[in-house]
Image (spheres, helix red, strand yellow):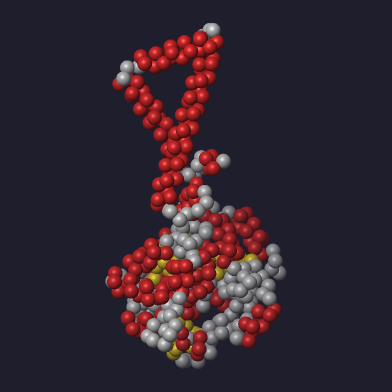
Amino acid sequence: MHFFKWLHPGLHIKRWLFLFGLGMMATSFGLVLTFNYQWLGQIEEWMFRILYEVTGHYNYTVLATIGILVIVAGIGIMGWATRRLIRTMLEVVMPNESGNISDLILSNMKLSKGPKVVVIGGGHGLSIMLRGLKTKTYNLTAVVTVADDGGSTGRIRQDLDIIAPGDLRNCLVALADKEGLMEKLFAHRFGGSGNLTGHSFGNLFIAALIEVLGDVEEAMDATSKVLKVRGKVIPASAEKIMLNAEMTDGRIIEGESHIPEAHGKIKRVFTTPEHPKAIQSAVDAIREADAIVLGPGSLYTSIMPNLCIPDIAAAIGDSKGKKIYICNVMTQPGETDGYTVADHVKAINRQAGSNIIDFVIANNGDVDPSILQHYAAAGSQPVMIDKKAVHEAGAILILSDLVNKETGATHNTKKLANVLFDLINALRTDLSPELLQYYLKRYTMKHT
């Protein structure tokens, strides 16, 4: 059964086995011509003589049967040898892979042909989603904010005068081919009481590569090779960006980490410098994407900083790919107090300068009451679903149970990836009205 898996459609093995067989036939024919074809006749005469001695007459049927068995045996030997050759080469290239290699190849080929998806944002919400998306397609690009200025990231920004590495690190680890020790290593924070106290090893690793290579993109590529990242992680900008917020009471809050602490209503966010330049590969990925996903994550401090970059915002607006917003499950104190789903969408559209959101995916699953009490104590509430207002904002609302029951009111990686890719795959078929209605019915039947 394992052998026949090598003949599974999509592996591109059968064509090469057939070509290998043709080559063997040509080689055999050439040898016959080179060394005098008459020796074949002598072999045939020898076989007939043996048959005559055994059976007492010339048996053409038995001789033909022997010939067929020889052909089958030859093909079997060629197939077995080819399979062993491929396995030997793959074991050298991928020595630590377990399981059936044909399944691995087929899976990788399928993922490499997946849709081109660009996700834009930052923070832990983005890394949670990426863990699910990497199982759906390898054509995945994360465009990540670099405006973070808190904790280890903020200290590195200040000391080394480079972009914020924290969110980049989280996304790289999330997209790693096999998480485990490297994830623990990159997330490790040094203890003690010295200068390294509180620093993340991953942040220091990325910072060192930026200094050694002198280029942010090269540093990302090098880290991706170390972690065997599926997809690409690209900073939204190579400039050192400071995120600022103008509050409705007129206050100006400087620094991404200070905005939630202001405890006011945000009117708008803007950056210093005012018009930072985007990394061109990020712009290109957005323009070529089949789907562009914003969120989940902090609305004003993870998603908006990317839209403050003119080239990023323009590329999103110009791209033919559908724009999908993943709404947070809970409101965020100091940023989105009292916000509904439509309020999130309107804020993004306002920052982008037009109604860019085509679809919104929001949770309508129940959250455990004890968990809700914990969030309420911190000033956070479930984001209210207002379907009509979302529609008026120019977006189509997709509802599903997306909650991770084990960790609380956060998104479940697998659930979110499944719903998102159901939509993306439907969009790739140009989403006929009938298919759209089926999709909407499937994901809105629980909502009244």
Q: How many marks?
A: 0
Residue 22 image offset from top left, x and y in percent? 40, 30
x and y percentages locating residue 13 in the rendered image? 46, 41
Q: What x and y, as percent, mark residue 120?
A: 46, 69
Q: Quadrant of the C terminus?
A: bottom right
Q: Is residue 25 visible?
A: yes
| Left or right position of 254 against 386 | left
Considering every residue shown, the one lying at the far front of the view is 53
Q: Tell me the quarter of the picture where residue 168 sits.
A: bottom left
| Foreground pick, 69 / 175 | 69
- The residue that appears at 57% across and 74% down in the rendered structure is 328
- Relative to 36, is 171 above or below? below
Task: Let me know if residue 145 appears in the view.
Answer: no
Image check: 319 left or right of 428? left
Q: What residue lies at 52% left-to-right and 62% top-to-bottom?
A: 133
Residue in the image at 42% along x and 61% along y: 228
In the rendered image, the quadrant that contains the N terminus is top right
Q: Picture coordinates of residue 155 (x, y %)?
A: 38, 84
Give the answer, above or below, for where 319 lies relative to 247: above
Of residues 413 and 433, the one nearer the viewer is 413
Q: Quadrant of residue 159?
A: bottom left
Give 153 or 102, whichever is nearer the viewer.
Answer: 102
Instruction: Give above or below for 117 relative to 82.
Output: below
Q: Residue at x 58, y 54 (%)?
A: 432
